[in-house]
Amino acid sequence: MRGFVRYAWRALAARRARTLLTVVGVALGVGVVVAALGVDAGLDASIDRTVASMVGRADLRVAAFEETGLSAGTLAQLAGVPGIAVEAPALERKSYLVSQPGRPVQTAPVTVLGVEPAVEPRVHDLPLARGAPLSGDADQTALITQTLARTDGLDVGSRLSILGMGAPVSVTVTGILAGDGPELGSAGRTVVLPIRTAMLLNVADGAPAPTQVDGVTRVDIVRASGAPVDQVAAAIGAALTLQPYVLSQPRDIAASLRASTLDVRSTMALLAAITLFAAAIMILNTMAMTVVERIRELGLLRAAGASRGQVTRVVFTQALLLGVGGSALGVAVGVVLAFAAAAWLRAGGQLAIDGPVITVWAVAAGVAAGMGVTLVAAIEPARRAAGISPVAVLRVRADLGQLVRSHTRWLVAVVAAIGVIAVLLLPGGATDLSVPLRAIAVYVLLLVAVLLTPTVLAPLARLVGLPFAALLRLEERLARASIRRDPSRTALTVGALVIGLAMVVALSAVAGSARASATAWLADVVPGDEVLTAIAPVPVGEGGVDQQVSAIDGVQLATPLASFDLAYAGTRLDAVAIRGADFLADGRLDFTAGDRTAALRAVDAGGAVILPEARAALLHVGLGDTMAVATSRGLVDLKVVGLVARSFPGRTGDAVLVGWGDALNRFGVLGADAIAVRYAPGRQADARPQVEALARQLALAASPISVVAGAVGDALDRLFGLLDLLALAAVVIAALGIVNTLSMNTLERVREIGTLRAAGMSRRQVWRSVLVEAGILGAIGGLVGSVAGVLVGLLLGGGAGAAGPVDAVPWSAVGLAMVLGVALAMLAAAQPARIASRVPIVTAVRGE
Amino acid sequence: MTLQPPAAAPAPGRTVLPILEARSLTRQYRMTGEIVEAVRGVTLSVMPGEFVALMGPSGSGKSTLLQLLGGLDQPTSGEVLLEGESIGRLSDSDATRLRRERTGFVFQSFNLVPLMNVVENVGLPFTIAGQDPRSADLSARIREAIALVELTGKERHKPDQLSAGEQQRVAVARAIVTRPALLFADEPTGNLDFRTGTGILDALWRTCVERGQTIVLVTHDAKAAAYADRVLVVGDGEVQDEIVLGRREDHAAAPLISRLALLGL
Ligand SMILES: Nc1ncnc2c1ncn2[C@@H]1O[C@H](COP(=O)(O)OP(=O)(O)O)[C@@H](O)[C@H]1O
Ligand SMILES: [Mg+2]
């Protein structure tokens, strides 16, 4: 065995550059795996931390379904449920601090959390950095976070004025909470008040102050010792009859948070597996070349009495050394990549991630993947090496068809291995079978693309050679001749590139459709040029914000919108309250069934609903059907008066549309979340400053539609940017493969090059012919990769749920893939081309 | 019947200058401290239209000498004159032009471009020089070269549809198609059996006789060297002897072998 190691080592050392490139290829594959696992574990850890800080010691959480919150009646029913030790109610809302002279002006909202000072500490820890905790139930005191204290220049003893529905509520800071405080998603800007003080924020001017605790957003429950959670949950289910509510357990919350990251995580895992696939193909190709190169030497070993097994072991030992080197380097690459990816995601603010978590398991999986892929890749070359007959001292070119066939078998083995690895990599929350199925479909598709490449190689080379031929006829002919010298080698070289570029194209197609579906509705659905958004519901109708805005000269229309939830047939539906007359006047919404005028009038009249087509199909309801919706006042019937192609996007799909009357009177909506503003033609320039001034005064955020679309798009771009980066790893691996292949082609053609040089070919011509060869390889990779990428995009996009149809052909991405393929390949060719052009003729033609 | 080398016959009143001259050529290789002298002070000249063979055992320095004469390699000392002009210190682009216009090479391995048919392979030097081999003038020259190596009728064949001997004849046609001043051939029959090798030598002979092509042939085989007008016997990096055979249509090796025997070789 020692002898093999030494021999294998020497074989690797003899081709230092090739060995290095191969190790880097393996390392990139391993790196992407480790990074994907590290980010995945990081997301998981952040979710666990989030859940822990959200629920604290609670076993169950009862959350309000309606905006009006849980009523005093519901709280009374809950108090009667047996088996409960602690009930900690809380009221959460967004608000603004009134600016005070001498303090930095802040326009960012704060999250106000009202709690019962006596009960809350039994469920949640509220660690204080300094000062004292809340004491009285209705005191005018507050705790703020260290972050808020720092940014707003506050401290213990500062007085705060918090905006509410009526007059601002004034409190004094008694304590500073450590760090960002208890509320996630508030960027650390949290104010904690006694619950009765917080309730004052919901009291409109002139209305009487509440006498009982109500309007609570959630109640966290700790069960009595010995009471099983499921029993308590069942008892709560039986007791609460007044209002719709959501009962959840910590594990449900974690599961739903995990589900929200599933798409990203499974795409990352898929990319990692595909990068490994590209690496595997590159390694196979390199090992096969090494065997071809040493064919005589191996033949001599056999002639000297080495057994087939010993020759096989030489090749495997070589693979083992490459795998160990590549995996070790890959773990380092992966750690760096994981930190960079986590920082990138955190900066984007889309996914909550504190940092990557590099577990022993992630490192082990990366190393196992690297070793596994390298060893599997060595099977075929080892078989070929063992098949060399002892008398094969003269170079024999094996039957190419047979080589391709054996490659097929090998590829199937690799894909099977990678499939297993990929399934192991898939995030734990992937209970949905469509995720692994889709991943397998993507592999099969890419595999077919790689396997088909040799058959289409000659015509494709001719086709993509045309532009090169127009400029450099000789170089193009020589390049194509070189490409056809060993079709299976070319196919594998191009194969890795096809895989990388296909993923680039596919991701771009999916990103494009995600972007389009995330923003296209804005123009189709929103009756306005600008949207004013409120952090807490604002009053509508008589004297409401919508009327104040419409009163501004130059504003044609200001229509209020509110999003809320509806409980229908045991599921949660996203709903938006609209004013039908405004939509009628502005001509928004594309009706696919029902009369538009009649439908929008019916919505305003009440008892009617407009459904997005896709939602109607899912719910199995049609035009004219009646839907019974659960509310605090019992079941309410809504008649389906129209179907629309698209509506406002919600958390689980497009929202159903109901009238403002129903929303306010029957579904517990308190006010508008947003006002859509349409300017009179030509008046936008002069009316906008007035609208924006009013918005500032009312603590509303004004954003033109284009800015909303841009913000949505930017967030998506950030996410896809990361995925693109991972896909690029596969393209880089392919480029390393191209360096190896072109070097090998040059080595094998050295005699031909020498003869051509003796016939008067210049160095520059030789150099250009290698570059053209790379260009043709790159263009073939780009073409096949684009076709495969479009298909992969359809596969990935088809499962993305909310996303609309993927653009048939993302031309810009196809263009990018072509340019990227050709440019990277030619870049990869620079060194081999230099070497080829510098081969001294005398060396090249020296006798055998 | 005796054949006279056409160009070798001087025109009345004119002295004929050698087409190729080597003066005190030396080539050393440095091998891990040790210096190998592959060519040692060789002086020789070749007349226009002459067919000269460099003959000697393996390792005697024939190839090195040929490469120096053809300008593929630079001598350690001494100089080479091609048509009276020194080719010792040419820039890379001048050397490339020299190879395009004035020399042709045939090596032991044929190295045809696999994707190209016979016409395209033969026309390759024109393509390399940026000329259009399909132009009337050049395609006539290509046809003529193909006829000279007796491959007429196989113009459209690709290399893998030709026998080894035929492939080497294509390589010969490729080397002479530009009508170089000098054709260099290094063991052109080394990869071929005797009968096939004879076909190559016949083709070289025809170009010499029919077109007055000057040829320098390197070989270790007396039967091949017997085609030449003059044989230079190379040993240990030096030209040890010269055997003038004259132009003979039968190419019989017997006279050469007996002369070699006389020299104790
Ligand atoms: N590039 C080189 N480096 C070192 N020695 C060389 C090189 N080329 C040729 N030689 C040596 O020079 C001598 C002559 O070689 P060569 O000209 O190829 O002989 P021939 O063609 O007669 O067989 C041999 O001893 C050979 O080993
Ligand atoms: Mg030789």
Image (cartoon, grey):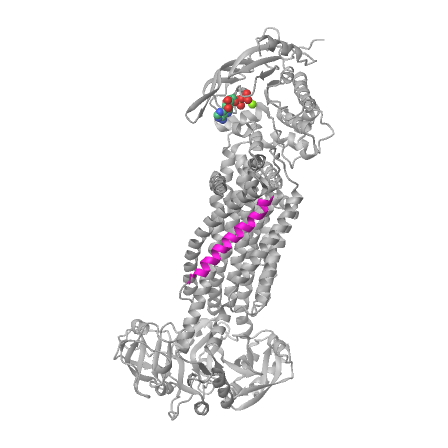
Where's residue A784, x and y in %? 61, 52
* Residue A16 vs residue A763, the one in the foreground: A16
Q: Is residue A417 left or right of residue A349?
A: right
Q: Residue furthest top?
A: B13
Residue at left offset 53%, top offset 46%: A316
Q: Is residue A122 above or below residue A832?
A: below
**Quarter of the view holding residue A201:** bottom left
| Quadrant in the picture for residue B161 | top right
Q: Is residue A380 magenta?
A: yes
Residue A509 pos. (x, y %)? 56, 61
Instruction: Give the quarter of the image for residue B245.
Output: top right
The answer to whether residue A823 shows anywhere in this view is no
Visible residue check, residue B61: yes
Query: The C terminus of chain B lies in which quarter of the figure?
Result: top right
**In the displayed structure, would residue A813 be above or below residue A233?**
above
Magenta stretch in the rendered image:
A356-383
> For residue A514: magenta?
no
Residue A848 image position (x, y, % from top left): 57, 28
Q: Nearer the viewer, residue A771 or B138?
A: A771
Q: Main secondary structure of the magenta part?
A: helix
A572 over A462 or under it: above or below: below
